[in-house]
Amino acid sequence: MLRSSWQTHLNDRLAQRREAKLWRERPILEQVVRQRDFASNDYLGLSDDPRLAEAQAQGARRFGAGAGASHLVSGHLSPHHELEERLAELMGRPRALLFSTGYMANLGTLQALGDSHTQIYQDRLNHASLLDGAALAGARSRRFHHRDLGDLHRLLERTPADSRRLVVSDGVFSMDGDIADITGLARTCQQHDAWLMIDDAHGIGVLGEHGDGCVGQCYGTDQVPILVATLGKALGSAGAVVAGDELLIETLIQFARPYIYTTAQPPGVASATLRALDILATEPERRTRLHDNIHHFRAGAAALGLPLMPSTTPIQPLLLGTSTKVMAWRDTLASHGFLVGAIREPTVPRGQARLRLTLSARHTLNDIDALLDCLGELVSHEWQGAQGATNS
Ligand code: PMP
């Protein structure tokens, strides 16, 4: 009886998703042709760098393939600790705490800080893990209009008197590619005795003079007390850190359940990230190449009349509108070997479906031109289709 009611319920949910044409797929890739991969977040082209693979293998040989336990039991090994120190330095903070994924870092931070006397304000376009973290905390949550300081100010003014205020924003917005106004957010928070948390998952390694992200060494802990960075994007490995002062980090160690109750990341992964940090410091030309590539793509896409969004980061979405169109373009690009992200509701609002293209230092100008050629063909087919419809 129980089994059949579950089957009906789940089958109905899956059928609804299929009918809405929002079915999510999970392609199995034997091998990724990185030159045609415009979908990953491997912004500096480090994920398959042999130096990271070698560091990971050495770390595994020395410390084991797995950490064997959580950080507070016996899993906090010296590569983890060294990585925390190096990341704290890069991010201009006294301390940093390593989590196994960015999703867990956000869940853990919000759960440890928030409670029913916490009012959390989130940018409307924040990453899902930030929204989920506020729910896990049992905090009161409000969303302000995207990058709208006036709206945030208005909400902060109405905070109930018995609440602590926490403002949370992505640094670089993962589906739009634009950058938060950190100076404005920090000022607004100071006016209202609020703490500010920035998730710089897509900024670390990419932005800032040292690849220190959109906050990093430019803003102190008095302006941005809580700074998150993930390690599975520009840094090419996996995991995340939360950086801040002693008080924040000790609070997380004592209270963040997604930190306390999980096995530490494999030590070889930490060793690979340490190697990535060396490369970040010694090969600044990777960042230069990445920004040249962004510029080249945007100029070519604008010339084709493609629906670019105002982004100066490696995330370059094309706002196509309907999910049907997004899937058709995605499939045509795939048939030419190009991997791009197809982003539809519920990840973005209805009517704002988009191709999410990402650029990497690994791409050459020729790789980008090949992608632009294919996009150009899609535009001209569409134009011919529209002409045909008008003439008929
Ligand atoms: N924050 C943002 C803004 C992200 O885009 C992502 C990943 N898509 C995460 C957090 C989660 O990071 P991870 O993949 O390491 O769990």
Image (spheres, rainbow, N blue to C red):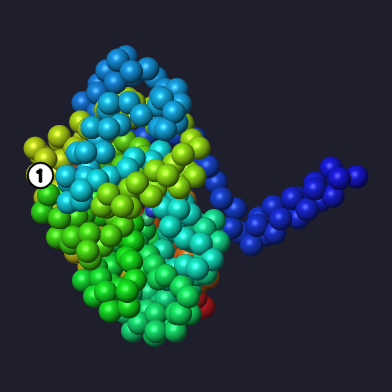
Give the percent coordinates (x, y) of residue 189.
30, 73
Quadrant location of residue 299?
bottom left
**Residue at 27%, 49% in the rendered image:** 246
Most foreground residue, 66 or 309: 66
**Residue at 71%, 55% in the rendered image:** 13
Q: Amino acid at mark 1?
A: Pro
> Which residue is situated farthest in the top direction here?
61
Of helix, strand and loop, which one carries label 1? loop
Q: Is residue 104 above or below residue 319?
A: above
Give the percent coordinates (x, y) of residue 107.
46, 52
> With 251 as the anchor, is 290 left or right in this view?
left
User: How many other residues sit within 10 Å of disc 1, few (<14), some (14-19) or many (≥20)?
Assistant: some
**Residue at 45%, 22% in the rendered image:** 68
Give the percent coordinates (x, y) of residue 122.
42, 69
Most foreground residue, 51 or 129: 129
Quadrant location of residue 110?
bottom left
